[in-house]
Amino acid sequence: MKALISRQSIIIASVAVLIAVITFISINVFGTVGPVTNLGNAVSRPIRAVSSTVTGIFERIYSSIYRYDDLLARHESLLRENARLIQDFRDAALLAEENALLREQLHFRERNPGHESELAMFQSWSGSNWSHSFTINRGYANSNVTSGNAVTTEYGVLIGQITDVGAMTSTVVTVLDTTFSAGALVGDGDGTVTARGDFSLMRSGLLMLDHIDDDQIISPGDTVVTSGRVGIFPPDLIIGEVVELHMHSTGIGRFATVRPMRMLDAISEVFVITDFEAVDE
């Protein structure tokens, strides 16, 4: 753009010089500006008009570019401010979520005064196809967790159980894992059944309810909770709900499939129950 403006300035300057030369010659030859000068003025007038118009156009273009640059700078400033506000909102949302978790944990402790628990963060799933387990950021060096501790949500839904405890991390097998087993109660029944992981059901996101008495009434939709009678898990932790009842392939005894109450693939925070009051047998 600067090159175009310079080129225009050169043309105008050349025309001006030409008129000056013609005027000088006319004064010396005719003693007045004369017809040559008038002719030069007549010829140059459209050129000057066009030059003035072009100059005005370029000035407006330059002014528009300046305003565009100013608007672009303001736009970038607003984008930076918007990004900062979004980050502040996310930080506030995380704090609110953490406060909600702590409040729920407080309510859980109020409902279960004998329980002691610690908040832990999910780290990663196991890469094995033969297990259903994950790692948390709590170990013997930074917490009171020990092998066998129950792992729950803030609402008292059983996720699984601590198995291996390292210095800063621990392994949790979920209720779907084949090594998981817990005494359980179903619906309003008093008879204790066994909730356990089963490899054939694990890939479907289900576990098995086994050792069901013949006279025990169990229906789809019934809630399955820990009995607490063996002393491994506290009582009344929610395991899941009954999906279907089946006969064993041997034709002897029944079992039920159970869907965990919590979507295990969406875990982010868990609570490890490090101590609780066992129920009387």
Image (spheres, grey):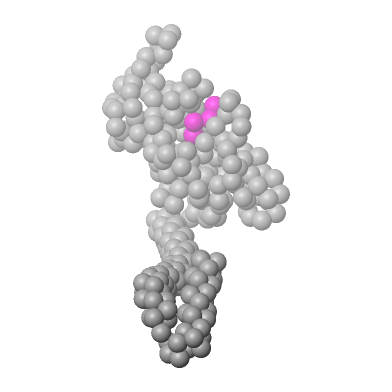
Location of residue 245 (image quadrant): top left
Residue drawn at the location 43% of the way across and 28% of the way down? 206
Magenta span has 77? no
- On the rendered structure, is 74 left or right of 241? right
Please provide percent x and percent y for residue 212.
Answer: 38, 23
> Which of 175/93 is in front?
93
Residue at the extreme bottom:
31
- On the rendered structure, is 165 left or right of 39? right
Residue 241 in view here: yes
**Label total for image:** 0
Is residue 113 placed above or below 36 in the rendered structure?
A: above
Please provide percent x and percent y for residue 158.
Answer: 46, 42
Residue drawn at the location 55% of the way across and 55% of the way down? 118
Residue drawn at the location 43% of the way across and 23% of the way down? 211
The residue range painted magenta reads 175-179
Is residue 40 placed above or below 7 in the rendered structure?
A: below
Is residue 34 placed above or below 166 in the rendered structure?
A: below
Is residue 3 placed above or below 182 in the rendered structure?
A: below
Q: Main secondary structure of the magenta part?
A: loop
Residue at the extreme top:
250
Location of residue 162 (image quadrant): top right
Please provide percent x and percent y for residue 263.
Answer: 42, 39
Residue 5 in view here: no
> Which of 158/93 is in front?
93
Residue drawn at the location 56% of the way across and 52% of the way down? 120
Please provide percent x and percent y for residue 185.
Answer: 38, 34
